[in-house]
Image (cartoon, rainbow, N blue to C red):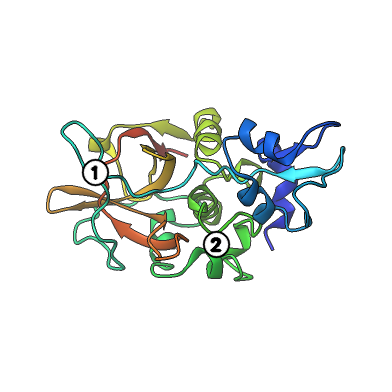
Amino acid sequence: MGTAAISNQKPSVHNIQYGETLSGIARANKTTVSALMKANPQIKDANKIYAGKPLNIPGRTDSFEAAKPSRPGGAGRPSTPSTQAPSTTGPASQGPKGSPFDIAKSHLGKNAGSLKMEKNGVGSDMEDWVPNNVNCANFVSACLEQAGQIKNSQHHNAVTGLQANLDKDPNFKRVSLAQAKPGDVVSMKTPGGHHVVMFAGMKNGKPQFIGSNNVNADGSQRISLSSMNYPIMSIHQYRG
């Protein structure tokens, strides 16, 4: 389930070189030894890795992390996540197979770890090796795939990787928040790195976003909807 796409995710796979250590690879990729071991269950001892073997890189910074209390000019944390769609959404972005926003909405309240186990739909397009606390790009990519807006080869588990793939796709165009439609891909800068969600319309004058967010008590992600005021890096709208 989802493993067929791994071969297409070259930026997320590292071939171990002679003399490298797991801690060194973790530092170079801005992640941790613990995260690498979770993404590579075949490794039983952090001190024993072998040259020539592939290593999945989980992209630790590509996650939604709660911010510290907001300061003037700083980013604040998101509002309480909801499992209800906003009252005003407007026309949603559509792909050949449907709307990624509607697809995402159908999974509100599900844990990312459980969703990846589903054999059909979004779950089948999510890569199950990705740790349960960093599934934001994995989930958005899968929704876009299900809507027919991107191909399997464009799926990416890192926020900046997905952002780059959409920049290269002539069917997507960067737009402003004022031009955004539900289902548009919103990449954000967070205090801990990056996060990617989809625009979900406006509610009480505030933009709403839907995605795989770190809202569970154990730090794992759940599909939820909320307002967020992290700086937006880009909004990609499908024009195909």
- Rendering coords of residue 124 (x, y %): 62, 63
Judged from the image, the secondary structure of the residue bearing numbered disc 1 is loop
Figure check: 123 above or below 139: below
Q: Residue furthest left?
A: 204
Q: Residue at x 44, y 59 (%)?
A: 219
The amino acid beneath tag 1 is Gly
Q: Position of residue 182 (x, y in %)?
A: 32, 50
Q: Quadrant of the N terminus?
A: bottom right
- Kindly identify which residue carries mark 2: 122
Q: Label 2, secondary structure: give it.
A: helix
Question: Residue at (31%, 68%) from the top-left corner?
Answer: 83
Of circles 2 and 1, the one toward us is: 1
Q: Earlier in the sequence, mark 2 or mark 1?
A: 1
Q: How many marks?
A: 2
Identify residue type, mark 2. Val
Residue 211, given in percent of the width and then of the height, sits at 40, 55
Q: Measured along the vertical axis of the image, is residue 142 above or below residue 121?
A: above
Q: Nearer the viewer, residue 110 or 34?
A: 34
The residue where tag 1 is placed is 76
Q: Residue at x 71, y 48 (%)?
A: 6
Quarter of the image for residue 184 reads: top left
**Compared to 205, does 108 lie above or below?**
below
Query: Does residue 72 lie above or below 94 as drawn?
Result: above
Query: What number is the disc on residue 125?
Result: none
Q: CA distance from mark 2 to mark 1?
A: 30 Å
Look at the numbered discs 2 and 1 and tell me whether their residues touch, using CB distance below 8 Å. no
Q: Position of residue 234 (x, y in %)?
A: 38, 32
Nearest the eye: 164 or 129: 129
Q: Nearer the viewer, residue 6 or 101?
A: 6
